[in-house]
Image (cartoon, coloured by chain):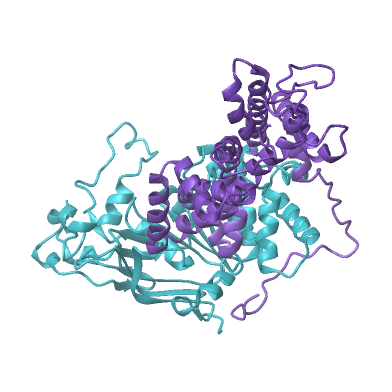
Chain colours: A purple, B cyan
Amino acid sequence: MSTVVSAPAPRMQPQAGEVQPQIEKLPPRRSRVWEKLRRRPSALFGAVLVGTFVILAIAAPILPIPPPAQGDWGAIRVAPSLDHPLGTDQNGRDLLSRMIWGAQASLLAGVVSVVIAVLAGVPLGVIAGWRGGWTDATISRITEALLAVPFLILAIAFAAFLGPSLTNAMIAIGLSATPIFIRLARGQTLAVKTEDYVESARAAGVGQMSILWRYILPNIAPPIIVQATLTVATAIIAEASLSFLGLGQQPPAPSWGAMLNTAKNFMEQAPWMAMWPGAAIFLVVLGFNLFGDGLRDALDPRES
Amino acid sequence: MSDNAPLLAVEDLSIMIGRQAENLVDGVSFSVMPGETLCIVGESGCGKSVTALALMGLLQTPPVHITSGSVRFDGHDLLGLSVDDWSDLRGDRMAMIFQEPMTALNPAFTIGDQIAESVMRHRRIGAEAARARALEMLERVGIPAARTRLDAYPHQLSGGMRQRAMIAMALANDPTLLIADEPTTALDVTIQAQVLQLIRDLQRESGTALILITHDLGVVAEVADKVAVMYAGRIVETAPVEALFNDPQHPYTIGLIGSLPGLEAGQRGSRLATIPGLVPAPESMPAGCRFADRCPFATATCAEAPPLREIASGHAVACHYAPLEEHCAPEQAA
C-alpha cells in the first residue's frame, strides 16, 4: 500500500448477521487442463509413447538385461532371437539392452537441452520485447547472429569448444536452440504487450513484474510450448549427430544416435541394427509432437 | 481538503508526440468535483483519449510525453509522483474503463481471478476475501449467475457482460474517480443504454466522480453534469450540461449539436447538418484558432489563438466572437 493514499473510501462491508455468500469452488486450473488433455486421444497416445520410453530409461538398471557394453564375440550381428530379442550389434552387444540404456541418453539430451534453451531464451526474449530500445536491439542482434549459423553447425561448435561429453552436448544443443526461443518470446511479447488487457492491468495498478508474470507469460506460453516439443525432437536428432561425430555420448555408452550411425555400415548384413534406434527416435519424436499439440489445446482457455 | 476543492484539477496540460511541432493536446484545463460527472466530447483524434491516459499515467513514453501543465488529484501532484506511487493510486483511488471490452480482459485468467487480483493489489486481504469481493462486485454490476461467472474466462462472456465485468473490476476498490473511455462505443445500442445506466447507478451509490469520454452527444445529455468539448487537442468550450445544449457558444459545439438527428416533425426526413472540412492533421495544425478553417464565422482575427474565456458562470469558450449574440450580426451568423 502506498503512503499517498489518503482517507479510505467507504467500503462495502457485509452487514452483521447477513449470511456470507458461500463460494462454490471449481476444481483448480491445473486439473482442468488435465481433464481436457485426457479427452484428447492423440495427446494421450503421445503421452503414453513418451511415458513408456521414460519408464524404460529410468528402469534400465533393474531390468533383467545384460550390461549395454558387454560384448559377446560368439554372437556378432545376430538377428532377433529368444536370447537377443532385438538382435546384437557388430561387437555382439545385446541391442535391447543398448536401446534401453540409449533411451536415457537420448531423452535426457532432448529434454535437458530444451529446458536450457527455454530457461535462457524465454526470459531474454520477454525482456527484449518488453523493454524495447537498446535492450531489444542488443539481444536481437546477438540472436540474429546466432540464427545466421545453421543449428547443427552451432551445436558442433559449442560442443567442440566445451569438450566431448553427453553433458556438454546437452549444453551445446541447448545454447544452439536458445535463439529460436528468444525470437519467439520476443515476437509474442511484442504482440501481447500492446493488448488492451495489459493496458487495463496497468490501469488497475498491477506492477510490472506481475504484468510480466501473469499477463505476458501465460499468453505467450502456448506457442512456446509447441515450439519446445518440436525442439525436443530436433534435439534428440542433434544429440544423435553429435554422438556420431564423437562429441556426444562417448563409447561404449550407448545412445540411439550413435547406434544408428554405427548401424549404417551394416545396413545389408544387419538391418535390425538400424531399425530399432530409427523406430525409437521416430516414436519418441511423434510422441512429443502429439503430446505438445494436445497440451497447447488444453492450455488454451478458449478451447473447451 | 476543503469541501469545494476539486477532486481533480488539470491545469494547462500539453502533450506532445515525438518531435512534432504542435502539441497533440494543447493547454487543456478542467476540473472535476467529488461525485461530479464530466463528459469530454470530441471526434476521433481530438486528444480526448490521450488526455485520459495522461491522467492515469499510462502514456506510452516515449514517444508521447507531457510537455507542460499540472494534474492535481485529491491533493497529490500526479505528474510529480514516482512510478510506484502512481501505480498505487491506479486501480485504487482512480480507475479506468476501456472502450473495447472484448480485449481488455486477460484471456488466460477467469474474471473472478482478475477482479480479485485488482483487489489484492490494493487491499491487505486474503484470496478468499478478495474472491468474495469479486463475487459481490459481479452481483452489483448485474451479471446473472455471478457465482458461476466468477470462474468464467473472458471469451465465455458476451461483450456487454465483459463490459460489466470491467466495470466491476474498476469499481472493486471504491475509487473516488472513474475514467471511462468510450465505455459503450463497442456495444450494441440496447446494451449501451443498460451499461450507461449501470455506470450512473453505481456512481450515484458510491459517490464516485466520473470522467466520461465520448463522441456521442446523446450520452452526454443523459449523464453529464459538466461538459468539455475538445477540438484538435484543445478545449473549445466547457459548460454545465444545460448551458451547453441550450446555449452553445463555440461554432464547433453549435455544429456538433446541429449535426444530431432530431425527432421533431419538421426535422424528420430532412438532411442532417454537417461541419464542412476535416480535422487538421497533427503535422499541419493551423497556428491560430484550430477550428478557423472550418468555421463559418472565421475572420482575420482567428489567425490568433483565442483563449478560453468565461462568458457566464462555469461556461467558458475559446472563441474571439463569444458570446456570439454580441459579436455577430444576424445576417452574418446565417
Task: Single out the residue that lies furthest toward the front.
Answer: A74
**Above-or-below relation of A256 to A196:** above
Tell me if B274 is positioned left or right of B125 in this view: left
> Which residue sits at x=72%, y=41%?
B144
Task: Single out the residue that lies furthest toward the bottom.
Answer: B2
Compare residues A7 and A57 and report the one nearer the observer: A57
Tell me if B95 is positioned left or right of A103 in this view: left
Tell me if B329 is positioned left or right of A102 in this view: left
- Residue B179 visible in image: yes
Give the image location of residue B222, x and y in percent: 49, 52
**Above-or-below relation of B139 to A70:** below
Residue B324 location, quadrant: bottom left
- Residue A206 visible in image: no
Compare residues B316 and B132 and report the one nearer the observer: B132
Give the image location of residue B244, x and y in percent: 37, 60
> Which residue sits at x=55%, y=84%?
B2
Tell me if B183 is positioned left or right of B312 in this view: right
Residue B70 location, quadrant: bottom left
> Which residue sits at x=47%, y=49%?
A157
Q: In which quarter of the image is the N terminus of chain B?
A: bottom right
Compare residues A8 and B238 and report the one nearer the observer: A8
**Above-or-below relation of B124 to A37:** below
Task: Single out the residue that lies furthest toward the right.
Answer: A17
Q: How many labels does the image show?
A: 0
Compare residues B40 and B265 and report the one nearer the observer: B40
Give the image location of residue A44, x and y in percent: 74, 28
Give the image location of residue B4, x and y in percent: 52, 80
